[in-house]
Image: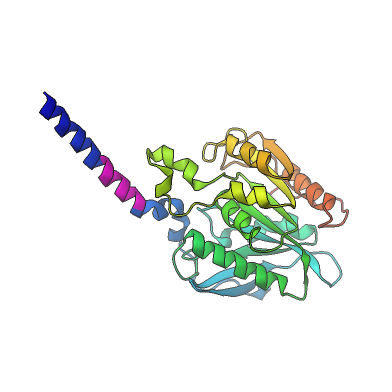
Amino acid sequence: MGANLVKIISSIVVAYGCYAAICFFAQRFIIYPGRGIRVPAAPPGPSAGIVPLRLETRFGRTEAWFLPGQGMAPGRRPAVLFFHGNGEIIDFLPEQMEGFRAMGMGVLLVEYPGYGRSEGKPSEAGIAATAVAAYDALAGRNDVDPARLVAFGRSLGCGPACGLSRQRPLTALILQSPFTSTRAFARRFLLPGFLIRDVYDNRTALAAFAGPVLILHGRSDDIVPFNHGEELARVARNIRFVPLACAHNDCPPDWREFWRILADFLRAHGVVAQQRGIYPTGGIT
């Protein structure tokens, strides 16, 4: 009986070890599913209102699209760096940025290595390097005010947005459905957190960020639990936390209200001027 029990335990340990090894080596396929989305070989041209950029990093060339702000006189304007979720690509997003553009803000849609037409493979280090290169390219434009740059992160995109705040000066952070760290998700797979390769420690980044932070999180979020947003709100120094009546992929539930919240936040912190009638009914999906 004792020998049989040892054999059973040994078999379980070996099986778990194999499972853990498979998860360790396959985790980036789980974290970055959008790398498999097919796109046209060429990006849209200037006639579509898009200015394609190529960002050079040690991880290869990555793509970004700049969308100028609307309805204001020429000059230096505020801008937002937009970091999308792990199942998206920038090709999906231009029409969804009209709320920012209507406020007179330029928008830089940042692609991840290995996604879309970008070279390389996605990883925390590669995406962080791309975020810094995107910031530098945006801040160097003569139609952008480098003193009014905001980073917006959605879901996985909250990782590079928060990480950028530790490497470059940002006026504010806006986070939709954020997570504290990817290590918190390891338990879903019955794994220890130290096996996670791309950590995205947003909690530490927010604790160190002195600027204003807006967090929007669905109370019924089925992908990133609501308590992640609550915990980040507790550690942020200058926070506005907005619970929403939605889950993850249907967030936000009311687009007009979403854009009103963003506009009020950006006005309150001097990013955009007082404006009316800028709340589209559609947006980020």
Query: Residue 272's x, y, as percent?
Result: 83, 57
**Dividing the picture into quarters, in which one does residue 134 lie?**
bottom right
Q: Residue at x 66, y 67 (%)?
A: 135
Q: Vertically, is 254 above or below 65?
A: above
Residue 130 on image: x %, y %:
56, 67
Q: Residue at x 42, y 38 (%)?
A: 188
Q: What is the x, y in percent for residue 245?
A: 65, 33
Question: Does the image show residue 50?
Answer: no
Where does the image place residue 176, in percent across and percent down from the top left? Answer: 64, 46
Q: Is residue 112 left or right of residue 271?
A: left
Position of residue 214 in the picture relative to residue 184 (left or right): right
Image quadrant where residue 98 sits: bottom right
Is 261 displayed left or right of 129 in the figure?
right
Q: As displayed, is residue 152 above or below residue 260?
A: below
- Please state if 165 lies on the left or on the right of 264 as rendered: left
20 falls in the magenta region? yes
247 part of magenta stretch? no
* Magenta stretch, overall SS: helix
Q: Quadrant of residue 241?
A: top right
Nearest the viewer among 152 and 132 is: 132
Please say if 280 is above or below 111: above
Of residues 8 and 103, the one drawn nearer to the viewer in this rendering: 8
Residue bounds of the magenta highlight: 16-24
